[in-house]
């Protein structure tokens, strides 16, 4: 497939974008400038009460994040997304909730952009209002547990142009936020854009 056969959606720094993709389409998340976490939600386009469930997927794959070639599932154990490729050093999180206004208020930061509000705004822009906000895939988030179970968030290891690619296993809504943490260490103290590249259904 050539680049011209892909639709590119830019997600500006500290914001979110939503779109709908058909069954079989590929979805690539590109870290344009590096060290930028993206929160990704995948919701069934035919039933907005079903979505990619991080908890159910951890149970199914018996790992904190699937390997390339494995599938993510919804709350009824049905595959919804396949993990096709990963050019990054490979740290992604499937444990954390999206950042929200209360997290930033705890840091003394008021009216701060955040992934929860950015999800809600982006989802509403395509008429999507799910009953709850699911936990996202935190692409490029470097927060693997220590051997004693401690969770330490480090700076994302992704380099400029690193990408992860998935395939939609049914028609889905996709919401991606470029995470808004602008202090050390999550995004390297610099919030930058992400891109979604959507390929044709295969
Ligand atoms: Zn965030």
Image: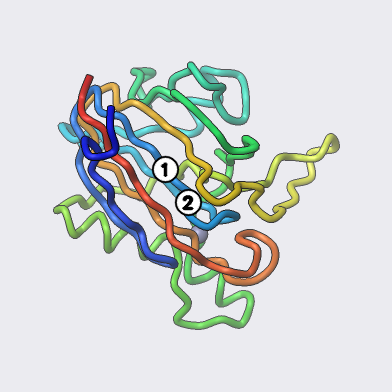
Which residue is more in the foreground, 118 or 2?
2
Indicate how the structure is coloured in the image: rainbow
Q: In this view, does 107 lie to the left or right of 201?
A: right
Identify residue for label 1.
29
| Residue 18 badge | none
Residue 148 on image: x %, y %:
85, 37
Q: Is residue 168 left or right of residue 20?
A: right
Res 91 → quadrant: top right
Which residue is more in the foreground, 127 or 19?
19
Q: What element carries label 1?
A: strand
From this view, report whether residue 154 is shown above or below residue 2.
below
Residue at disc 2, CB closer than 8 Å to ligand 1: no
Q: Residue at x 63, y 69 (%)?
A: 189
Q: Is mark 2 on a helix, strand or loop?
A: strand
Which residue is more in the foreground, 69 or 65?
69
The mark nearer the N terminus, 1 or 2, is 1
Q: Which residue is drawn at 62% across and 35% down?
A: 90
Q: Residue at x 29, y 56 (%)?
A: 17
Check contact, mark 1 vs mark 2: CB within 8 A.
yes
Marks 1 and 2, Cα distance to the nearest angstrom?
Answer: 8 Å
Q: In this view, does 162 lie to the left or right of 154?
A: left
Identify residue for label 2.
38
Residue 100 on image: x %, y %:
48, 65
The C terminus lies in quadrant: top left
Residue 68 on image: x %, y %:
52, 21
From this view, report whether residue 124 is shown above or below residue 69.
below
Crowd around label 2: few <14 · some 14–19 · many ≥20 (10 Å): many
Q: Residue at x 56, y 73 (%)?
A: 104
């Amino acid at each position: 497939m050539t680049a011209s056969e892909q639709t590119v959606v830019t997600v500006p720094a500290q914001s979110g974008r939503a779109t709908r993709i058909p069954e079989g389409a590929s979805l690539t998340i590109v870290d344009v400038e590096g060290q930028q976490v993206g929160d990704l939600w995948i919701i069934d386009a035919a039933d907005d009460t079903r979505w990619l469930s991080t908890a159910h997927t951890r149970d199914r794959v018996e790992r904190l994040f699937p390997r390339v070639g494995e599938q993510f599932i919804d709350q009824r154990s049905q595959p919804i997304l396949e993990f096709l490729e990963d050019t990054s050093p490979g740290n992604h999180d499937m444990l954390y909730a999206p950042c929200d206004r209360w997290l930033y208020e705890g840091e003394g930061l008021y009216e701060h952009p955040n992934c929860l509000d950015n999800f809600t705004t982006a989802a509403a822009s395509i008429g999507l209002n799910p009953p709850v906000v699911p936990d996202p895939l935190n692409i490029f988030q470097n927060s693997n547990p220590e051997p004693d179970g401690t969770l330490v968030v480090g700076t994302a290891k992704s380099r400029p142009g690193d990408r992860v690619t998935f395939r939609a296993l049914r028609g889905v809504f996709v919401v991606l936020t470029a995470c808004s943490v602008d202090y050390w260490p999550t995004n390297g103290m610099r919030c930058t854009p992400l891109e979604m590249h959507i390929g044709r259904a295969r």
